[in-house]
Image: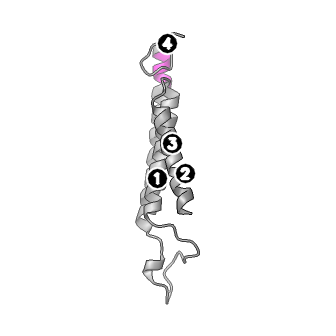
Amino acid sequence: MELVLALAIGIMTSSGVWLLLRPRTYQVIIGLSLLSYAVNLFIFSVGGVKSNAAPLLENGVKTADLADPVPQALVLTAIVIGFATTALFLVVLLAARGLTGTDHVDGREQPK
């Protein structure tokens, strides 16, 4: 399970960085979103991947057998903030495209 999680984080991070280097603003926004999702998965994995563990404290269950709730709360907060930031970036993208007439990062159409 840890290998699959590490591969998912690596693929999402590399895809996000690749999209960040693209010339169009929509691709940059998607790259930022992928990078934030990769960071969220990393923070979530720091809390420990526990399977078949009780979500609540019960008698006889050691606290070491439970998943850490702090990374889960941080990831939940980061998801909400990331959604709001992505919406703001999309509004800025639409405004910049309306003003410049292109969606390139530098505001100029690239020669072919």
Q: Earlier in the sequence, mark 3 or mark 4?
A: 3
**SS for callout 2:** helix
**SS for callout 4:** loop
Q: CA distance from mark 4 to mark 1?
A: 34 Å
| Residues rendered magenta in the picture | 94-99
Mark nearer the viewer, 1 or 2: 2
Residue 2 seen in render = yes
Q: Residue at x 45, y 35 (%)?
A: 88
Q: Specify the principal SS of the magenta part.
A: helix
Which residue is disc 1 drawn over? 40
Which residue is disc 2 drawn over? 8
Q: Residue at x 57, y 63 (%)?
A: 1
**SS for callout 3:** helix
Q: Earlier in the sequence, mark 1 or mark 2?
A: 2
Disc 1 residue type (three-letter): Asn
Q: Which mark is residue 101?
A: none
Q: Residue at x 46, y 37 (%)?
A: 17
| Marker count (numbered) | 4
Q: CA distance from mark 1 to mark 2?
A: 12 Å
Q: Earlier in the sequence, mark 3 or mark 2?
A: 2
Which residue is disc 3 drawn over? 34
Vertical placement of 53 versus 103: above or below?
Answer: below
**Colour pattern of the rendering:** one colour
Disc 2 residue type (three-letter): Ala
Vertical placement of 25 versus 50: above or below?
Answer: above
Q: CA distance from mark 4 to mark 2?
A: 34 Å
Vertical placement of 35 versus 26: above or below?
Answer: below
Q: CA distance from mark 3 to mark 2?
A: 11 Å
Q: Which mark is residue 109?
A: 4
Q: Tell me, yes or no, whether the highlighted magenta stretch contains residue 95.
A: yes
Q: Earlier in the sequence, mark 3 or mark 1?
A: 3
